[in-house]
Amino acid sequence: MPAAFYLRYRFSTLRPNGVLLDYTASIKIKGDSMHREFLMGNEAMAVGALAAGVNVVAGYPGTPSTEVLETVAKRRGEGVYVEWSVNEKAALEVAAGAAYAGARALVTMKQVGLNVASDPLMSLSYIGVKGGMVVLVADDPGPISSQTEQDTRTFAAYAKLPVFDPSSPAEAYEMMGEVFALSEELGCPVIVRPTTRVDHGYEDIEVADEKDWVSHEPEGFVRDPSRWVIFPALSVRAHAAIEARDAELAKRFSGYARNTVVQTAVPEARPRLGIATHGINATYVAENLSEKDDVRVLRVATPYPFPEDLAADFLDGLDEVLCVEELDPVIERALIATCGRRGLTVKIRGKLTGDIQPSGENTVESVGRALDAFLGRESDVARPCMSPQLPVRPPVLCAGCPHRASFYAVKKAMRGRKTLFCGDIGCYTLGNAKPLDMVDTCLCMGAGINIAQGVTHVEPDTAAFAFVGDSTFFASGITGVVNAFYNQANMTLVVLDNSTTAMTGHQPHPGTGRTMMGQVVEKVSIERVLRAIGLTVVETVDPLDHECSVETVRRVADEPGVKAIIFRSPCVVLARPKARSAVDAEKCVGCQRCVRELGCPALVPDAATGKVRIDPAQCTGCTLCEQICPTNAISGGERL
Ligand SMILES: Cc1ncc(C[n+]2csc(CCOP(=O)(O)OP(=O)(O)O)c2C)c(N)n1
Ligand code: SF4
Ligand code: SF4
């Protein structure tokens, strides 16, 4: 089965120790009847999990992982339970509980989500599971849409859990059955870590017909405190067992068919140079090699436990190896260790030697340049045409976004005062852009509320505001408010409630009253949560009512202690306009106050006259500009 994948690399396969071995995969996701589908990598993994008989799927949205769970929700059969959990820690614990009860469970998140879920994951590594449990963590080289460029392969080694690194949507689909089988066999969670180009790349792949999907009946939870209750005595035993298991697994992975050594088909070749790679980089390497290149290639699909025996076979007879990797130099370090342990004198090059860029995403072009230098060749490999340089377009809040109105109201209300505006993660981070310029700090989800408290301990005369989105409030904001209230902080919490998780594609959350199973449920009220914590000043305002918003901020900010304003107005992508605003050119005096103060992309100044017109294709009729124009030149807007 995997051989077909490697045929695309135009190499003849070579394993110095003989035939490629596959470990037993008890979950067959290749059925008797197959069909082809053009799938995104994330869709492929979702379908792979369903075909492998997954029973319970939980996750928290985050690019580039989000579509996995959304596809499960769309394509699941009756017996499959799916939820957007309140955050990644909750998701991982829900999946763990299901796996304790013998279910096959999948949990999905982006790489920074694993930081949130790391507490249960580290302990779960010791406790283990009964049903197969797959932890799907999407990494984001670049980063393109994340705070960090962390590498889940490194995290997996830290957690001492096996990790699989797919290099294409088709392989990611096939791996799902293998990892569920392995997890069940070993009794531990297994991590799958695709990167953005595998998550979001499309491929025409062969998948099992639905009638052939595995049906898995969980045994149910069997009470056994000696197994499910973590205590130091259990951890002492478990740690020793994990070390032994991972050493054994490293040997076994040397025979795993997706860990491969291949070499170019140059007649009489005796390559002295090797390339070690992984994931999507394996495809970039293949794109950049031709039959003329006399080179041996190691592709590592299981970076932890590292398949050292296979790596030693690969290194045998080579002078130098270039490690083509993204994020951490995981393979590079493992090869250096292999050489050290086995007394091999092969020079290992890569990120640590400056031959591969130490950070950022690799491309076909950047890998091509690195290979040209390493192989000492004039490149005659036809490179795919470079995409044209596009104008730089910094991200901005959408026209009519209610977050703009909220920021503008706070800005106006607090003008002239010593303030601190702590932001957070979501669309509203874009409030940092000029002309709003309303985000002084942004660290990670939920952090702004605590950072505001920290600053005021040092600067008590600062009026501190913490802006948090509704999804972020539920994910990791509530504990910050409890901390503030309990520790007698003096700050204003501003919840920007657009009734959705907008940044990641409008997923439901506890405040929306919808679940991923399609149920309409009681909303968790942000007001009631805040009052239950003990806040006595909690005001809810429509940010598009500018005057009322400014007056509320002025009043609330002067209250002592922790107080809250909830700016509630639906995301503009979900609330279409009834009528758009327009500028009366006769009345417009060209002062450009609307443009200078709001920065709405629908407001277009005329370079010659200075007068402004409104782009009807973008305007959402939010009326904010109407409310601030000094000559009442703008009118006509209406929101549904
Ligand atoms: C730990 C973590 N998990 C997930 C994400 C991905 N993510 C970025 S913003 C966001 C939530 C945004 O929703 P909300 O707070 O409601 O703000 P909105 O975008 O709707 O304005 C999520 C889940 C992340 N950055 N960090
Ligand atoms: S009404 Fe004004 S501020 Fe609102 S979207 Fe239209 S142009 Fe922008
Ligand atoms: S604020 Fe009013 S008068 Fe000034 S430029 Fe905008 S539309 Fe014209």
Image (cartoon, rainbow, N blue to C red):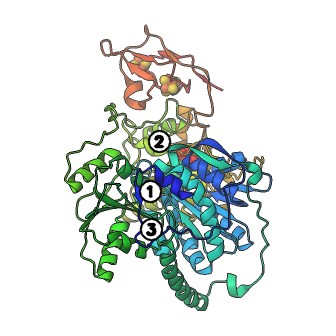
Mark 3 residue crowding within 10 angstroms, few (<14) / some (14–19) / many (20+): many
Pointer 1: what residue? 279
Q: Is residue 427 above or below residue 594?
A: below
Looking at the image, can residue 377 be seen? yes
Out of 279 and 547, give the one closest to the viewer: 279
Mark 1 residue crowding within 10 angstroms, few (<14) / some (14–19) / many (20+): many
Mark before the other along the chain sequence, 3 or 2:
3
Residue 623, percent across and down?
54, 25
Q: Amino acid at mark 2?
A: Val
Residue 12, percent across and down?
41, 57
Pointer 2: what residue? 410
Q: Is residue 382 above or below residue 627?
A: below
Q: CA distance from mark 1 to mark 2?
A: 46 Å
Determine whether the beta carbon of the residue marked 1 sits less than 8 angstroms from the nearest atom of ligand 1: no
When asked about the image quadrant of residue 454, the answer is: bottom left
Out of 115 and 563, give the one closest to the viewer: 115
Judged by depth in the image, the label closer to the viewer, 3 or 2, is 3
The residue drawn where x is 77% and y is 75% is: 221
Pointer 3: what residue? 303
Residue 216, percent across and down?
76, 64
Q: CA distance from mark 3 to mark 1?
A: 10 Å
Mark 2 residue crowding within 10 angstroms, few (<14) / some (14–19) / many (20+): many
Give the number of callouts: 3
Q: Amino acid at mark 3?
A: Pro
The residue drawn where x is 68% and y is 61% is: 28
Residue 428, percent across and down?
48, 44
Instruction: Specify whether 101 is left or right of 187.
Output: right
